Image (cartoon, helix red, strand yellow):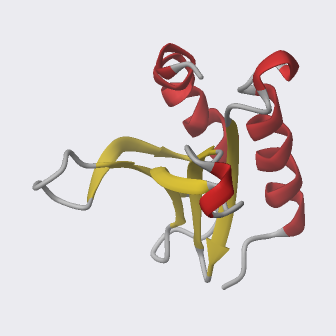
């Protein structure tokens, strides 16, 4: 199942709101999709631009559409290094953006 376009639009808006305009040249929050998974990314510019212009991306969280319960979403947080890749967060919800609100304070505290 592909991520519905209305969910993509709402998540894109949410991502844009996470970083003040004054620091968007130092950090951006974005997302990618694969099937029924939407991964939230912390994007940073290259430390040495002369060696390459590609920004790095670190996976922070994932929204997954629940198969057994159509219309429900589950939030997964990236696990600590050396631990499980993704840690499931409970409860799931009908609104994927409401799930993302659980990680807003962590995003803001990470800063540029």
Q: Residue at x 11, y 54 (%)?
A: 83
Which quadrant: the C terminus?
top right
Q: Residue furthest front?
A: 50
Q: Say if 4 sits above or below 56 in the image.
A: below
Q: Residue at x 56, y 55 (%)?
A: 56
Residue 34 image offset from top left, x and y in percent: 61, 79
Inspect this view and state whether residue 42 appears.
yes
Residue 28 image offset from top left, x and y in percent: 71, 39
* Count of picture labels: 0
Which quadrant: the N terminus?
bottom right
Residue 31 image offset from top left, x and y in percent: 67, 57
Residue 91 image offset from top left, x and y in percent: 39, 41
Inspect this view and state whether residue 74 appears.
no
Q: Residue furthest left?
A: 82
> Which one is in front, 26 or 21?
26
Q: Say if 106 sits above or below 84 in the image.
A: above
Which image quadrant for residue 82? bottom left
């Amino acid at each position: 199942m592909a991520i519905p376009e209305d969910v993509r639009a709402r998540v894109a808006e949410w991502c844009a709101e996470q970083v003040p305009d004054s620091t968007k040249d130092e950090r951006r929050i974005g997302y990618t999709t694969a099937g029924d998974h939407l991964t939230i990314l912390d994007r940073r510019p290259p430390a040495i631009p002369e060696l390459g212009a590609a920004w790095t991306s670190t996976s922070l969280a994932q929204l997954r559409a629940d198969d057994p319960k159509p219309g429900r979403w589950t939030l997964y947080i990236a696990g600590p290094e050396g631990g499980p890749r993704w840690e499931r967060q409970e409860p799931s919800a009908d609104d994927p953006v409401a799930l993302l609100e659980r990680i807003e304070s962590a995003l803001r505290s990470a800063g540029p």
